[in-house]
Amino acid sequence: MRWQSLPLFVGFGVLALIVGTRAVLVEGQRANREAAREAIEYQESLSGLLSLAQEAETSQRGYLLTGEKSYLQPYRHAIEAIPGQLARIDGMTAPDDQLIQQINRIKEALSQKQAELAETIALYDSGNAAKALELVRSGQGKTAMEQIRASMDTIRRISGAAIAARDEHTDRVESWLRIGSFAALLAIFLLGAYTIRLSRRRFREVAVAQEELMRKNIELGNEIRTRETAESQIRQMQKMEAVGQLTGGIAHDFNNMLAVIISAMNLAQRKLARGEHDIAKFIEAAVDAATRAANLTARLLAFSRQQPLAPQVVDTNRLVTGMSDLLRRALGETIRVETVLAGGLWKTHADPSQIENAILNLAVNARDAMDDNGKLTIETANSHLDDSYAATHAEVKAGQYVMIAVSDTGAGMPADVMERAFEPFFTTKPVNKGTGLGLSQVFGFVKQSGGHVKIYSEPGEGTTIKLYLPRFFGAEEAVLPTGRGDNPAEVTETVLVVEDDARVRASTTDALRELGYTVIHAGSGEEALQKLADNPGVALMFTDIVMPVMNGRKLAEEALARLPQLKVIFTTGFTKNAVVHNGVLDHDVHFLAKPFTIEQLATKLRDVLDTK
């Protein structure tokens, strides 16, 4: 029995020896592959260093050719990244004298190249462009780059030879692995012959189980794809429904307003043609419709978070107190107004006029919900929205907020109405009693200001809408005096109007002349600069922003470089442009949104012209 088991023991011993040897060979192969991988990473790091040097050189050339500061951004990025890249290369460099020597040469050449780049930029910045270009043409930087490339080529040859040696060793290891594998397979076959039938039976069972699992996986995958397709179709339908509702609401309201304007203007034309002059009511109707159209556009911009905001440090308690007369006029005598103002209320940084508009919108909605008879409560408080609250509410950041709550004793809202309350043109009011844009405008403003809106309502129990505006932590901004006196200044200034649309340019020019200003006009930035050169006494430039070739911001920069005392007012019909970023007007920018009335134009001009 013992002798019969001896071949089995010997076989297992041989098999163990083969497997052990194979394991040692596998470990050696893994080490070789790891070394090859490290060599490749080393080469990639060197290539990255060369790319940074080339990026800095290209950025410098662009700046020297154009003078645009934006071209220096890649240069600064490369200069900041080069030390870190060199540190990584040092950490990866093997203790090889040849490699260390080449790396030192790269560092020396790279230092020379950086010095050359910095010197040319400094010369250009100081106004010595000729000397900067002379330094570039001297070839000093080119020689440094050639030295860097030459050293990197040498390193590649050294590393390539090492990789080739490792590959040869790996090939030998793989040959031994194949031999060991065949020997192991033979040993396994000799030692496991008696288990073949049992193994086959078990393999068949496993195969059947795998086929069943695969079939179920296929069925599950088909079900998942079907569900995803259905959900995607539902989302698309919801998007199209929302877009359809939005465009339908815009078309409906704008067509109504345009119908009033066109009809009033046609009637006015007919009366004037007959020599009649009693057209005041038609003009008033057209102006009223155009004003409502402008307000509709402003509300849509507010909902889409594209309105230009002029944020200030706001004391909300003082703002609410100052609105008391406005609220009484808007709500009527039958609505009781109560304010509950928190002591020690934090400041917030937001557009105060938009906060007032938001409170007024909510108050008017509350009045309509109470049928002009009830109680309106405006409350302020310091509030903290924690991480758990932020995790369950989209676009909410945990932190400290100033809370403004507007509550009414009206009919309240059911859950389905609350879900759609902020949708544009959604309203439960009767026809001609609301546009459905009030709450959407409030929502857009608060979100654009980094805040949060929450509705609490139950049918028959009234509604509370809470606005959360981020707490302001900085120092309160000083309000600079405008230098205007009590009496309006006499109009003596010359104004340059820059507008590429001929009709808008003509109407703006006529309005300014009506106000008493001396007006010159231009249809492009280039023409405006020529007019300024011909008329150095221009006091203010009133320019559109969106113009071809040279926009209003670039025109203003060029004009102010020539005439530093020139005042500038920007205007446009859409605010996502060169003077508004993240929904906030740039510092010291004077802006008047289109469309504007002649009274708004007159006020803005005097505000800017009378500012010291």
Image (cartoon, rainbow, N blue to C red):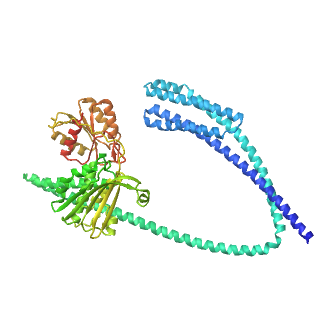
In the displayed structure, 111 sits above or below 198; it is above
Give percent across and percent down for residue 328.
Answer: 17, 56
Residue at figure coordinates x 76%, y 47% from the top left: 168
In the displayed structure, does residue 185 sit left or right of residue 391? Answer: right
Seen from the viewer's position, the closer of residues 24 and 531 is 24
In the displayed structure, does residue 511 sit left or right of residue 553? Answer: left
Seen from the viewer's position, the closer of residues 236 and 549 is 236
Q: What is the quadrant of residue 481 in the picture?
A: top left
Residue at figure coordinates x 65%, y 72% from the top left: 210
Give percent across and percent down for residue 298.
Answer: 27, 53
Residue reaching furthest to the right? 3
Note whether residue 95 is visible. Answer: yes
The N terminus lies in which quarter of the figure? bottom right
Give percent across and percent down for residue 313.
Answer: 31, 45
Seen from the viewer's position, the closer of residues 231 and 496 is 231
Residue at figure coordinates x 20%, y 42% from the top left: 603
